[in-house]
Structures are given as structure tokens and as C-alpha cells.
Amino acid sequence: MNWRGGSNGKAFDAAAHKIEARRLPARIAVLSIDVEHDYNGDGSAALNRLPDLLTAVRSAGLPLTAFVEGRLFVERPDICTCLVEADADLHLHCHDHRHPGDTAESLAAGIDAFGSFIGAAPRGYRANTYGLTEEIFQELVAAGFAWDSSILPGIGLGCRPDAAFRRGDWFLFDDSLAEYPVASWRFGNLRTIPFICSYRQLIGPFAESLLERVATLPELVIYDMHMVDLVPDGRLRRSPLPLWLKGAHALTRWRQRGFEDLAALGQRLRRQGYRWTTMTALHELSMENQGSGV
């Protein structure tokens, strides 16, 4: 596993592609969850609490976008049915988190599983551990995906601090694939600590309150989370994660954000002028405003 994420392939090379930075006409926030087995393994104690999450976001008035691990469409159709019945915005995640990275074969398997269950091809994608590779980029374009949300500008596991991703709210790659980056705190144009559930737990509420005073959030906030970020799971030791990452999870479990934090986060961003929406609605909005370049 490399620092950019779980991929074994060549990382997406921003310098090798035409990348156009684009702006949105308003502040937009998207609540997204990577729906997958617990801690990259076969556990499901946290995953099984998904119905509780769906109830919580409904009560908070927060639309939910779900990136679903491909194998769940076959192995856990009950979970996928819950998402459909809750009117979640469904898109494809990696096919199997037990493997360290995406491949053309695993992407094809995920597309087939998604299509068989949903009855339509996926339009959006999120790579394993934010590890967008050259191979997967080309495969996404060939398969007709409209957009991707794998780039995490900033520092840390899976992150991409490339200068190309410091400007704009979203990006158009090679006139063919829209990229909606996951949120990170920023100092000017510099993207730093990821603004996602796992990192918020890692730095803790005191450090986050300091960040709020000296840093800002991007105009497009795509907030990502996992069920293991939200609810306790006692099976971390059986996970295939590396020891250092298990340690990071263990250190933060005592201050899990939980469902109540989502409601507070929703209110907090609304007060800051953000409108909560889904990835599908975001893509429609951005296509209507493609002329808003940087």
C-alpha cells in the first residue's frame, strides 16, 4: 500500500492530462458514505447499523450519497435495498476492499454487480482509498462514467497535494470526466487536513475548533464517512489493515462522532451558507455552469 492510497498501479498523473479548474455558482455540501464491509475485511457489525444512519440523516434533513462496494450488491442485497428504499443517491465504490487497489477487472466486476442490482450503469465512482490510477481513469472514461470523486487534496493517506488541485471547486479531466474532490481544510490555495469523518476524529474537537479560526473550507464540501467512523465495532483486530492504521482507528474510537454529530454538522454548514445536495444533483448543476472556469 502506498501513501496515495491502496492502489498498486501508477497514480493518476495530473501533469499528463488536460485539467480544467471550474467554479460553482454557490456553496454546495454533499454528505457521502463509502458503504463497505468493516475495516477492509469481512466484518459487518458496523455495516449492519446502516438503517440507523438512514433514520438519522432523514431526521436531520440531509440527503445522502452512497458509494457502494461492488460485492455488496451480491453479498448483502439487504443493505443495498435499504439504500434504495431510503432514496439514497447510489454510485459505485471499489469492488472488494480486501484487495489493496482497483484494477480494470475489479472495476468491470463492480459495474456488472451494480447494473444487475440497480438496472442501470453507474455514473459516478470512488476509488479504493482515494487511489485514482491512470489505469482506472482510462477505464472510467471507456465505460462511460460521467464523474469521479476520488481525489482528496491535502496531506495524509490517499491524499493528493498536487498544485493542479489547489484551484477550482471541481475539475474536468481531458474534456471527458468530471472530478469532484473530497473536502480538505485550506489556507489560501493550499489544501491541508482532510475534512472527512475519520480525520475529524483523529485530530479531535479541540484541534478542529482551532482550525475553524485559521483555515477555511472549500466552496464545495464533499464530506466522506464510513460506518466504522460512526458506530463501535469490536472486530478491528481481525481486519486486514496494516498495524499502524489499526492503531489510528483504535486511538480514535473513544471519540467517535456518531449520528448526533451529523445533525450538528448539517446545521453548522447551513449557517455558513452551504446547501446540502447529492452527487447526482451536484453533477447536474456543474454541467449547467461549465462556463464558470478559473
Image (tube, rainbow, N blue to C red):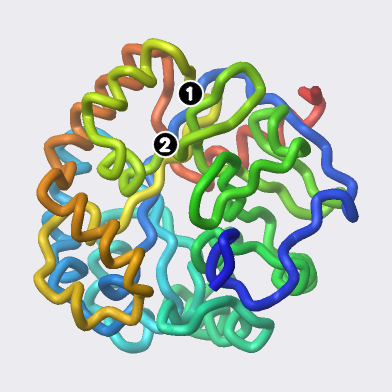
> Counting residues from the N terminus, which is met first, the one under dot 1 or under dot 2?
2
What separation in Å lies between label 1 and label 2 (alpha carbons)?
Answer: 8 Å
Residue 286 visible: yes
The residue beneath circle 1 is 217
Report if the CB atoms under discs 1 and 2 are less than 8 Å apart.
yes
Q: Nearer the viewer, residue 115 or 98?
A: 98
Q: Which mark is residue 195?
A: 2
Picture residue at 33% right of the left edge, 51% below the top: 225
User: Is 129 left or right of 170, judged from the image as shown?
Assistant: left
Which kind of residue does numbered mark 1 sit on? Leu
Q: Quadrant of the C terminus?
A: top right
Decide: few, some or many residues near mark 1? Use Cα within 10 Å; few <14, some 14-19, many ≥20.
some
Q: Nearer the viewer, residue 9 or 276?
A: 9
Find numbered disc 1 in the image and state the secondary structure of the residue it sits on. loop
Find numbered disc 2 in the image and state the secondary structure of the residue it sits on. loop
Picture residue at 49% right of the left edge, 67% below the top: 93
Q: Position of residue 51 (x, y in %)?
A: 15, 60
Which kind of residue does numbered mark 2 sit on? Phe
**Placement of 265 over or under 96, stated as above or below:** above
Q: Position of residue 166 (x, y in %)?
A: 69, 31
**Placement of 263 over or under 292, stated as above or below:** below
Residue 125 visible: no
Identify the image quadrant of residue 255: top left
Q: Nearer the viewer, residue 281 or 232?
A: 232
